[in-house]
Amino acid sequence: MATSRAPLRFAEAVSVTVSAAAKSGFFFDFDGTLAPVTRDPGAVVPVAGALERLAALSRLVGRVAVVSARPVAFLCERFAQLPAVRLYGLDGLQTVAGGEIRTDREAEPWAPVMRRLAEEAARELPRGVQVEDRGLMVALHYRAAPGARGAVERWASARAARLGLTEQLGRMVVELRPPVRRDLGTVVGEESAGLVTAWYFGDDLPDARAFEALRERERRDPAFAGVRVAVADSETGDELARRADLALGSPAEIPMLLDQVIRAFAGRQ
């Protein structure tokens, strides 16, 4: 039985990436990773320098993608100037192909259910809880009302059980989505097929699924190298960082780390 090897050191991971550029990939979560988490989810934009580094990476490696719980339309607005970067929204339920947004066929019939759920949440949850209707996902943010956490989680669990939905806990948010087996892990697993090395950057507990997808690939293929990067925060603690090969202190450190990777390519030319 194949076993996963010890994590690569950063310098070694960069060297492997540069030497197999066309078969290397970089995958990024959005909120808390490429962008700071704020009280207004609609106002979030990538940190300074992130777009420029992703553009540079997309010219150097075989694959660069953003994999987020946000709708693809939201991601398209933030990354409009980066056509080479692949976008996956709603944890993979949506993507862009040929300039058009495509939605998972198994998830599409759930749209009316999710719309009614968002309306119920807006009426029934405590004041200060922000209900974000993402179409096929409903996010219940209690950042502006931290005392409402228990009420939000109880309400979400009851609705998930009643409607057969999937419940996902995150940074001061509970997300409800259709019971479709597609998430950050399945997307990264599919997208890393054929690659020699793949990096995943995330900040929250759902990102652990992407970390595990890379580990599973390593178990099946000892020649494959996965690099797991956690962006630390005070809300999810050290749990994701403990599963990572490398931990950063904030989204602002992402461009600096990518600069080191990009400079390594320049040194090989």
Image (tube, rainbow, N blue to C red):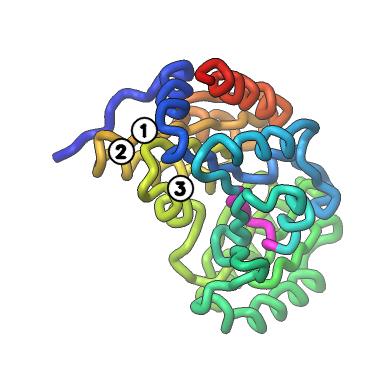
For label 1, the residue is: 225
- Of residue 171 and residue 265, the one placed in the foreground of this image is 265
* Mark 3 residue element: helix
Q: Is residue 142 visible?
A: no
Q: Is residue 1 visible?
A: yes
> Which amino acid, mark 2?
Glu
Q: Earlier in the sequence, mark 2 or mark 1?
A: 2
Residue at image location 44% in from the left, 24% down from the top: 13
Instruction: Name the quadrant containing residue 201.
Output: top right
- Left or right of 124? Residue 137 is left
Above or below, 48 against 97 in this view is above
**Percent x, y of residue 181:** 44, 66
Residue at image location 69% in from the left, 47% down from the top: 172
Residue interval drawn in magenta? 66-72
For label 3, the residue is: 209
* Mark 2 residue element: helix
| Mark 2 vs 1: CB contact within 8 A | yes
